[in-house]
């Protein structure tokens, strides 16, 4: 078996179906298997997948284990020399995965390879990144949420790179990640403590610390209809992303830095919420009210997560 293609599904029935269809349509010269891990979807995903794709392996969880743990489950049964992680809201293109597989076979020092990703409107998704520093992590998860902006994007998203050539990078997106299975030192891919978000960055950093290399490869591009699983609850998504970043900071700094980091971000959330509460008492501006509700929901979600 050349490649085990792993997809984690959570209430994205139609998107997962499209993703699998694109695999069977465009993967031509690679021996592969498809493993779908369903995180207790309530949209009829399991029934559809069993009926439409009897040839795949379906793991049915009885609760939502998160993105990382679900991928880890698939790794334990995967037969392929390589693991190809695909988000459920992605689709292959006519180029298939032949080129990225050939690059992986011919580049023995490449442990992780991230491919080129386009959004649904054909614009480029910056899928290879530089590592953040602690300061930018704090600002990104606190103040920058107000306007949903990314002031560090030019550096962190490697916008100075044309994304048309192959190069070694710090980390790549888990939405489209090819992994050389036999060099993994643990029985899992992602840190099981991370529910979702930051698990790809954490994994790449660990691999580099172990002496492995991470590459960006522009061949075999895919489409990514970004953020579909968490699009209906922004506050919960923000909190999950923040909690993932806390574990990332603890893994790569230490627990005391992680505590400081957590206190700083939550302190900013409280301050922003108080300012928005004061402003909303003088103004009925819809944007101010919606931001106030967002930060109120985030604080509630965070309280529930630490109980």
Image: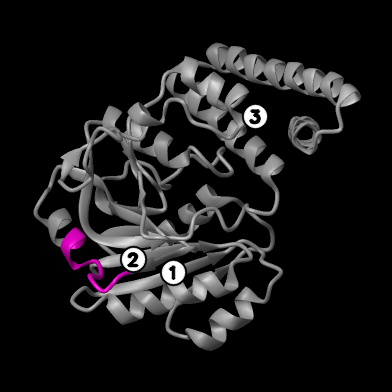
| Residue 267, quarter of picture | top right
Tell whether label 2 touches label 1 (CB within 8 Å): yes
Q: Secondary structure at mark 2?
A: strand
Label 3 vs label 1, nearer the camera: 3
Tell whether label 3 touches label 2 (CB within 8 Å): no
Label 1: few (<14), some (14–19) or many (≥20) C-alpha neighbours in 10 Å: many
Q: Secondary structure at mark 1?
A: strand
Viewer-proximal residue among 165 and 2: 165
Mark 2 vs 3, N-terminal side: 2
Residue at x-position 15% and y-position 46% = 165
| Residue 306, quarter of picture | top right
> Residue 146 bears which disc, if any?
3
Q: State the residue position of label 1.
A: 35
Q: Is residue 206 visible?
A: no
* Mark 1 vs mark 2, CA separation in Å: 7 Å
Q: Is residue 282 visible?
A: yes
């Amino acid at each position: 078996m050349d490649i085990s293609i792993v997809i984690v599904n959570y209430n994205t029935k139609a998107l997962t179906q499209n993703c699998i269809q694109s695999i069977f349509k465009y993967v031509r010269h690679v021996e592969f298997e498809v493993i779908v891990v369903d995180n207790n979807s309530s949209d009829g995903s399991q029934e559809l997948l069993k009926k439409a794709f009897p040839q795949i392996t379906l793991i049915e969880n009885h609760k939502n284990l998160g993105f990382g743990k679900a991928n880890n489950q698939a790794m334990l049964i995967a037969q392929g020399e390589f693991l190809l992680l695909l988000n459920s809201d992605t689709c292959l293109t006519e180029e298939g995965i032949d080129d990225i597989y050939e690059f992986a076979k011919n580049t023995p020092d490449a442990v992780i390879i991230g491919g080129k990703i386009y959004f649904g409107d054909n614009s480029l998704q910056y899928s290879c990144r530089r590592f953040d520093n602690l300061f930018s992590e704090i600002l990104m998860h606190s103040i920058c949420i107000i306007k949903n902006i990314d002031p560090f994007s030019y550096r962190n998203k490697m916008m100075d790179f044309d994304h048309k050539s192959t190069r070694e990078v710090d980390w790549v997106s888990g939405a489209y990640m090819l992994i050389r299975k036999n060099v993994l030192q643990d029985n899992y891919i992602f840190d099981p403590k991370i529910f979702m978000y930051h698990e790809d960055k954490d994994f790449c950093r660990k691999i580099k610390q172990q002496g492995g290399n991470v590459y960006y490869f522009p061949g075999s591009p895919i489409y990514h209809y970004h953020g579909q699983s968490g699009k209906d609850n922004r506050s919960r998504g923000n909190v999950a992303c923040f909690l993932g970043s806390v574990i990332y900071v603890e893994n790569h700094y230490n627990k005391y830095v992680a505590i400081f980091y957590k206190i700083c971000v939550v302190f900013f959330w409280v301050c922003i919420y108080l300012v928005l509460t004061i402003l909303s008492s003088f103004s009925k501006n819809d944007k101010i009210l919606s931001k106030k509700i967002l930060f109120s929901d985030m604080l509630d979600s965070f309280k529930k997560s630490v109980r």
